[in-house]
Image (cartoon, rainbow, N blue to C red):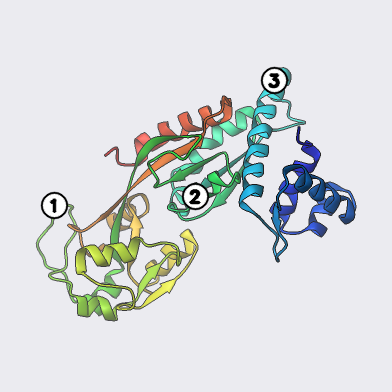
Protein backbone atom coordinates (compact mmCIF):
# COMPACT_ATOMS: atom_id res chain seq x y z
CA UNK A 1 0.00 0.00 0.00
CA UNK A 2 1.16 3.51 -0.77
CA UNK A 3 1.22 6.08 2.00
CA UNK A 4 -1.09 8.88 0.94
CA UNK A 5 0.81 11.40 3.05
CA UNK A 6 3.79 10.63 0.83
CA UNK A 7 1.68 10.92 -2.33
CA UNK A 8 0.39 14.27 -1.12
CA UNK A 9 3.97 15.42 -0.57
CA UNK A 10 4.80 14.41 -4.15
CA UNK A 11 1.79 16.32 -5.50
CA UNK A 12 2.63 19.47 -3.53
CA UNK A 13 6.32 19.40 -4.50
CA UNK A 14 5.36 19.24 -8.18
CA UNK A 15 2.60 21.86 -7.94
CA UNK A 16 4.83 24.24 -5.97
CA UNK A 17 7.92 23.52 -8.06
CA UNK A 18 10.25 22.71 -5.19
CA UNK A 19 10.80 21.20 -1.74
CA UNK A 20 11.07 24.47 0.20
CA UNK A 21 7.73 25.85 -0.99
CA UNK A 22 6.12 22.44 -0.49
CA UNK A 23 7.33 22.36 3.11
CA UNK A 24 5.63 25.69 3.78
CA UNK A 25 2.36 24.49 2.25
CA UNK A 26 2.45 21.21 4.19
CA UNK A 27 3.61 22.93 7.41
CA UNK A 28 6.50 20.50 7.88
CA UNK A 29 10.25 20.80 7.47
CA UNK A 30 11.99 20.51 4.12
CA UNK A 31 13.83 17.44 5.35
CA UNK A 32 10.50 15.82 6.23
CA UNK A 33 9.26 16.47 2.69
CA UNK A 34 12.45 14.94 1.28
CA UNK A 35 12.03 11.92 3.52
CA UNK A 36 8.46 11.33 2.32
CA UNK A 37 9.55 11.50 -1.30
CA UNK A 38 12.46 9.17 -0.62
CA UNK A 39 10.15 6.65 1.07
CA UNK A 40 7.82 6.76 -1.90
CA UNK A 41 10.68 6.28 -4.37
CA UNK A 42 11.98 3.33 -2.34
CA UNK A 43 8.48 1.83 -2.35
CA UNK A 44 8.08 1.95 -6.13
CA UNK A 45 11.77 1.40 -6.86
CA UNK A 46 12.04 4.34 -9.27
CA UNK A 47 12.88 8.03 -9.26
CA UNK A 48 9.73 10.15 -9.15
CA UNK A 49 11.17 13.64 -9.53
CA UNK A 50 13.62 15.44 -11.75
CA UNK A 51 15.41 17.75 -9.30
CA UNK A 52 15.49 20.72 -11.67
CA UNK A 53 14.29 24.27 -11.11
CA UNK A 54 11.34 23.97 -10.99
CA UNK A 55 11.07 20.35 -9.91
CA UNK A 56 9.09 18.19 -12.36
CA UNK A 57 7.71 14.67 -12.17
CA UNK A 58 9.20 11.72 -14.04
CA UNK A 59 6.84 9.54 -16.14
CA UNK A 60 6.38 7.24 -13.13
CA UNK A 61 5.81 10.24 -10.90
CA UNK A 62 3.12 11.49 -13.28
CA UNK A 63 1.35 8.13 -13.10
CA UNK A 64 1.34 8.31 -9.31
CA UNK A 65 0.04 11.89 -9.44
CA UNK A 66 -2.79 10.79 -11.72
CA UNK A 67 -3.67 7.99 -9.29
CA UNK A 68 -3.55 10.39 -6.33
CA UNK A 69 -5.79 12.92 -8.10
CA UNK A 70 -8.35 10.24 -8.93
CA UNK A 71 -8.42 9.01 -5.33
CA UNK A 72 -8.82 12.59 -4.12
CA UNK A 73 -11.82 13.08 -6.37
CA UNK A 74 -13.47 9.85 -5.22
CA UNK A 75 -12.84 10.70 -1.57
CA UNK A 76 -14.34 14.15 -2.13
CA UNK A 77 -17.44 12.55 -3.61
CA UNK A 78 -17.73 10.15 -0.68
CA UNK A 79 -17.34 13.01 1.77
CA UNK A 80 -19.96 15.00 -0.13
CA UNK A 81 -22.42 12.11 0.07
CA UNK A 82 -21.83 11.75 3.80
CA UNK A 83 -21.72 15.45 4.63
CA UNK A 84 -23.98 16.84 1.88
CA UNK A 85 -21.20 18.93 0.32
CA UNK A 86 -19.83 20.22 3.61
CA UNK A 87 -18.66 23.81 2.90
CA UNK A 88 -15.91 23.32 5.47
CA UNK A 89 -14.33 20.71 3.18
CA UNK A 90 -15.14 21.85 -0.37
CA UNK A 91 -14.23 19.67 -3.31
CA UNK A 92 -11.66 21.10 -5.72
CA UNK A 93 -12.21 20.17 -9.38
CA UNK A 94 -9.21 20.76 -11.65
CA UNK A 95 -10.00 21.29 -15.32
CA UNK A 96 -7.75 22.10 -18.28
CA UNK A 97 -9.30 24.47 -20.81
CA UNK A 98 -8.24 26.52 -23.83
CA UNK A 99 -8.17 30.31 -23.57
CA UNK A 100 -10.82 30.96 -26.24
CA UNK A 101 -13.37 28.76 -24.47
CA UNK A 102 -12.53 30.36 -21.13
CA UNK A 103 -13.01 33.83 -22.59
CA UNK A 104 -16.47 33.03 -23.98
CA UNK A 105 -18.79 30.13 -23.08
CA UNK A 106 -16.93 28.02 -20.51
CA UNK A 107 -17.38 29.86 -17.18
CA UNK A 108 -21.09 30.64 -17.69
CA UNK A 109 -21.60 26.90 -18.18
CA UNK A 110 -20.16 26.01 -14.76
CA UNK A 111 -20.79 29.02 -12.51
CA UNK A 112 -24.24 28.03 -11.29
CA UNK A 113 -23.36 24.40 -10.61
CA UNK A 114 -20.19 25.21 -8.67
CA UNK A 115 -22.11 27.75 -6.57
CA UNK A 116 -24.86 25.26 -5.75
CA UNK A 117 -22.46 22.52 -4.69
CA UNK A 118 -19.93 24.82 -2.98
CA UNK A 119 -17.17 23.25 -5.06
CA UNK A 120 -13.91 25.00 -5.89
CA UNK A 121 -12.81 25.35 -9.51
CA UNK A 122 -9.11 25.21 -10.40
CA UNK A 123 -8.44 25.95 -14.05
CA UNK A 124 -5.28 25.25 -16.03
CA UNK A 125 -5.22 27.23 -19.27
CA UNK A 126 -3.35 25.87 -22.27
CA UNK A 127 -3.74 25.51 -26.02
CA UNK A 128 -6.63 23.19 -26.90
CA UNK A 129 -4.22 20.81 -28.65
CA UNK A 130 -2.19 20.40 -25.43
CA UNK A 131 -4.80 20.26 -22.65
CA UNK A 132 -5.16 16.47 -22.91
CA UNK A 133 -1.54 16.13 -21.76
CA UNK A 134 -2.56 17.76 -18.47
CA UNK A 135 -5.27 15.14 -18.09
CA UNK A 136 -2.83 12.36 -18.93
CA UNK A 137 -0.32 13.67 -16.38
CA UNK A 138 -2.91 13.76 -13.62
CA UNK A 139 -2.90 17.56 -13.35
CA UNK A 140 -6.59 17.76 -14.28
CA UNK A 141 -9.64 15.50 -13.93
CA UNK A 142 -11.06 16.66 -17.25
CA UNK A 143 -10.14 18.84 -20.19
CA UNK A 144 -11.55 20.67 -23.19
CA UNK A 145 -9.42 19.42 -26.07
CA UNK A 146 -9.25 18.96 -29.83
CA UNK A 147 -8.24 15.32 -29.31
CA UNK A 148 -11.20 13.12 -30.20
CA UNK A 149 -9.72 9.69 -29.49
CA UNK A 150 -10.00 9.02 -25.74
CA UNK A 151 -6.77 8.38 -23.90
CA UNK A 152 -6.35 5.17 -21.94
CA UNK A 153 -8.73 5.15 -18.99
CA UNK A 154 -10.66 8.17 -20.29
CA UNK A 155 -13.87 8.99 -22.16
CA UNK A 156 -14.27 11.57 -24.92
CA UNK A 157 -17.51 13.49 -25.60
CA UNK A 158 -18.11 15.92 -28.49
CA UNK A 159 -18.99 19.43 -27.30
CA UNK A 160 -19.17 21.39 -30.54
CA UNK A 161 -17.07 23.29 -33.05
CA UNK A 162 -15.50 26.72 -32.70
CA UNK A 163 -15.32 28.53 -36.04
CA UNK A 164 -12.47 31.02 -36.51
CA UNK A 165 -12.82 34.06 -38.76
CA UNK A 166 -9.91 35.97 -40.25
CA UNK A 167 -10.54 39.57 -39.17
CA UNK A 168 -8.97 43.01 -38.92
CA UNK A 169 -10.09 46.57 -38.37
CA UNK A 170 -11.27 48.48 -41.47
CA UNK A 171 -8.26 50.78 -41.09
CA UNK A 172 -5.76 47.92 -40.98
CA UNK A 173 -7.49 46.14 -43.85
CA UNK A 174 -7.43 49.23 -46.06
CA UNK A 175 -3.75 49.84 -45.27
CA UNK A 176 -2.56 46.34 -46.20
CA UNK A 177 -5.25 44.85 -48.44
CA UNK A 178 -6.93 47.80 -50.16
CA UNK A 179 -10.62 48.59 -50.21
CA UNK A 180 -13.20 45.75 -50.17
CA UNK A 181 -15.61 45.12 -53.01
CA UNK A 182 -19.04 46.68 -52.71
CA UNK A 183 -20.83 43.39 -53.32
CA UNK A 184 -22.21 41.41 -50.41
CA UNK A 185 -21.03 37.91 -49.58
CA UNK A 186 -23.26 35.12 -48.25
CA UNK A 187 -22.11 35.97 -44.71
CA UNK A 188 -23.17 39.59 -45.09
CA UNK A 189 -19.64 40.99 -44.94
CA UNK A 190 -17.91 42.85 -47.71
CA UNK A 191 -15.15 40.50 -48.90
CA UNK A 192 -11.75 41.58 -50.15
CA UNK A 193 -10.94 40.83 -53.73
CA UNK A 194 -8.05 38.42 -54.07
CA UNK A 195 -5.89 38.75 -50.98
CA UNK A 196 -2.46 37.60 -52.10
CA UNK A 197 0.58 35.93 -50.60
CA UNK A 198 2.53 39.14 -51.16
CA UNK A 199 0.02 41.16 -49.11
CA UNK A 200 -0.05 38.60 -46.31
CA UNK A 201 3.75 38.53 -46.24
CA UNK A 202 3.80 42.24 -45.39
CA UNK A 203 0.73 42.46 -43.14
CA UNK A 204 1.61 41.62 -39.51
CA UNK A 205 -0.50 38.86 -37.98
CA UNK A 206 -1.53 38.50 -34.34
CA UNK A 207 -0.93 34.97 -33.02
CA UNK A 208 -1.94 33.70 -29.59
CA UNK A 209 1.20 31.73 -28.71
CA UNK A 210 4.00 29.65 -30.14
CA UNK A 211 1.94 26.54 -29.32
CA UNK A 212 -1.03 27.78 -31.31
CA UNK A 213 -0.71 26.44 -34.86
CA UNK A 214 -4.12 27.60 -36.10
CA UNK A 215 -2.80 30.63 -37.97
CA UNK A 216 -0.04 28.55 -39.50
CA UNK A 217 -2.58 25.95 -40.69
CA UNK A 218 -4.84 28.70 -42.08
CA UNK A 219 -2.10 30.23 -44.24
CA UNK A 220 -0.85 26.81 -45.34
CA UNK A 221 -4.34 25.56 -46.29
CA UNK A 222 -5.63 28.62 -48.11
CA UNK A 223 -2.51 30.49 -49.27
CA UNK A 224 0.18 27.79 -49.51
CA UNK A 225 2.44 29.73 -47.13
CA UNK A 226 5.01 28.26 -44.73
CA UNK A 227 6.40 29.61 -41.42
CA UNK A 228 8.84 32.44 -41.96
CA UNK A 229 6.89 33.90 -44.87
CA UNK A 230 4.92 36.32 -42.68
CA UNK A 231 5.42 38.63 -39.69
CA UNK A 232 3.54 38.16 -36.47
CA UNK A 233 2.91 39.58 -33.01
CA UNK A 234 2.70 36.87 -30.33
CA UNK A 235 0.28 37.76 -27.53
CA UNK A 236 -0.57 34.87 -25.15
CA UNK A 237 -3.70 36.39 -23.61
CA UNK A 238 -7.15 35.91 -25.09
CA UNK A 239 -8.29 39.41 -24.07
CA UNK A 240 -5.07 41.17 -25.13
CA UNK A 241 -4.92 39.12 -28.34
CA UNK A 242 -8.32 40.49 -29.37
CA UNK A 243 -7.44 43.98 -28.15
CA UNK A 244 -4.32 43.98 -30.33
CA UNK A 245 -6.46 43.25 -33.39
CA UNK A 246 -8.97 45.93 -32.36
CA UNK A 247 -6.07 48.40 -32.03
CA UNK A 248 -4.99 47.65 -35.62
CA UNK A 249 -1.72 45.99 -34.62
CA UNK A 250 -2.47 43.15 -37.00
CA UNK A 251 -5.05 40.77 -38.40
CA UNK A 252 -5.86 37.42 -36.82
CA UNK A 253 -8.14 34.42 -36.44
CA UNK A 254 -10.85 35.07 -33.86
CA UNK A 255 -13.50 32.62 -32.65
CA UNK A 256 -17.01 33.28 -33.95
CA UNK A 257 -18.38 34.04 -30.47
CA UNK A 258 -16.05 37.02 -30.16
CA UNK A 259 -15.72 38.00 -33.80
CA UNK A 260 -19.33 38.21 -34.99
CA UNK A 261 -20.55 40.87 -32.50
CA UNK A 262 -17.56 43.06 -33.44
CA UNK A 263 -18.23 42.56 -37.15
CA UNK A 264 -21.90 43.46 -36.66
CA UNK A 265 -20.83 46.71 -34.95
CA UNK A 266 -18.37 47.57 -37.71
CA UNK A 267 -15.35 47.36 -35.43
CA UNK A 268 -13.85 44.48 -37.42
CA UNK A 269 -14.09 43.27 -41.01
CA UNK A 270 -13.91 39.64 -42.06
CA UNK A 271 -11.13 39.43 -44.62
CA UNK A 272 -11.88 35.98 -46.05
CA UNK A 273 -15.57 35.07 -45.50
CA UNK A 274 -15.28 31.96 -47.65
CA UNK A 275 -12.14 30.82 -45.84
CA UNK A 276 -12.67 29.92 -42.19
CA UNK A 277 -11.11 27.42 -39.81
CA UNK A 278 -13.21 25.00 -37.79
CA UNK A 279 -11.90 23.49 -34.56
CA UNK A 280 -13.95 20.67 -32.98
CA UNK A 281 -13.81 20.54 -29.18
CA UNK A 282 -14.22 17.49 -26.95
CA UNK A 283 -14.59 16.88 -23.22
CA UNK A 284 -12.24 14.16 -22.02
CA UNK A 285 -12.31 12.86 -18.44
CA UNK A 286 -11.24 9.88 -16.38
CA UNK A 287 -13.42 6.78 -16.37
CA UNK A 288 -14.16 6.89 -12.66
CA UNK A 289 -17.56 7.04 -11.00
CA UNK A 290 -17.35 10.59 -9.72
CA UNK A 291 -20.40 12.80 -9.92
CA UNK A 292 -18.24 15.90 -10.40
CA UNK A 293 -17.05 14.93 -13.87
CA UNK A 294 -20.53 13.76 -14.87
CA UNK A 295 -22.19 16.99 -13.79
CA UNK A 296 -19.44 19.12 -15.31
CA UNK A 297 -19.93 17.41 -18.68
CA UNK A 298 -23.72 17.88 -18.56
CA UNK A 299 -23.29 21.57 -17.80
CA UNK A 300 -20.67 22.06 -20.52
CA UNK A 301 -22.70 20.14 -23.10
CA UNK A 302 -25.85 22.17 -22.40
CA UNK A 303 -24.07 25.49 -22.84
CA UNK A 304 -21.99 24.31 -25.80
CA UNK A 305 -25.22 23.26 -27.55
CA UNK A 306 -26.24 26.93 -27.72
CA UNK A 307 -22.80 28.50 -28.34
CA UNK A 308 -20.74 26.13 -30.47
CA UNK A 309 -21.54 24.80 -33.92
CA UNK A 310 -22.94 21.26 -33.66
CA UNK A 311 -21.17 19.93 -36.75
Mark 3 to mark 2 CA distance (whole Å): 31 Å
Q: Residue 123's x, y, as percent?
A: 58, 47
Q: Secondary structure at mark 2?
A: helix
**Disc nearest the viewer among 2 and 1:** 2
Name the residue furthest top.
82
Q: Is residue 189 above or below residue 195?
A: above
Q: Residues within 10 Å of mark 3 (few under 14, many from 20)?
A: few
Q: Quadrant of the C terminus?
A: top left
Q: Residue 137's x, y, as percent?
A: 58, 47
Nearer the N terminus, badge 1 or badge 3? Answer: 3
Q: Residues within 10 Å of mark 2 (few under 14, many from 20)?
A: many
Q: Residue 129's x, y, as percent?
A: 43, 53
Nearer the N terminus, badge 2 or badge 1? Answer: 2
Residue 288, quarter of the rendered image: top right
Q: Secondary structure at mark 1?
A: loop
Residue holding disc 1: 186
**Disc nearest the viewer among 3 and 2:** 2
Residue holding disc 3: 84
Horizontally, residue 206 falls left or right of residue 74, namely: left
Name the residue furthest front.
45
Residue 131: mark in rendering: 2
Q: Quadrant of the N terminus?
A: top right
Q: Residue 77's x, y, as percent?
A: 65, 25
Amino acid sequence: MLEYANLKALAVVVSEGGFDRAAKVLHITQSAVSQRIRQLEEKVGQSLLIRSNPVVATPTGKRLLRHYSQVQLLESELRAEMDADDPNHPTTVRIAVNADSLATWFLPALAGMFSRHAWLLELIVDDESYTHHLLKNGEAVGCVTTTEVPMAGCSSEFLGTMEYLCVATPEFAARYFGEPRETQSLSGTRPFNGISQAQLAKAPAVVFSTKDKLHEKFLAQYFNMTPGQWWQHTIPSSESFLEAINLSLGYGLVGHLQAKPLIDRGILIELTPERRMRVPLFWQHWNIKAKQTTLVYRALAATAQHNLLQV
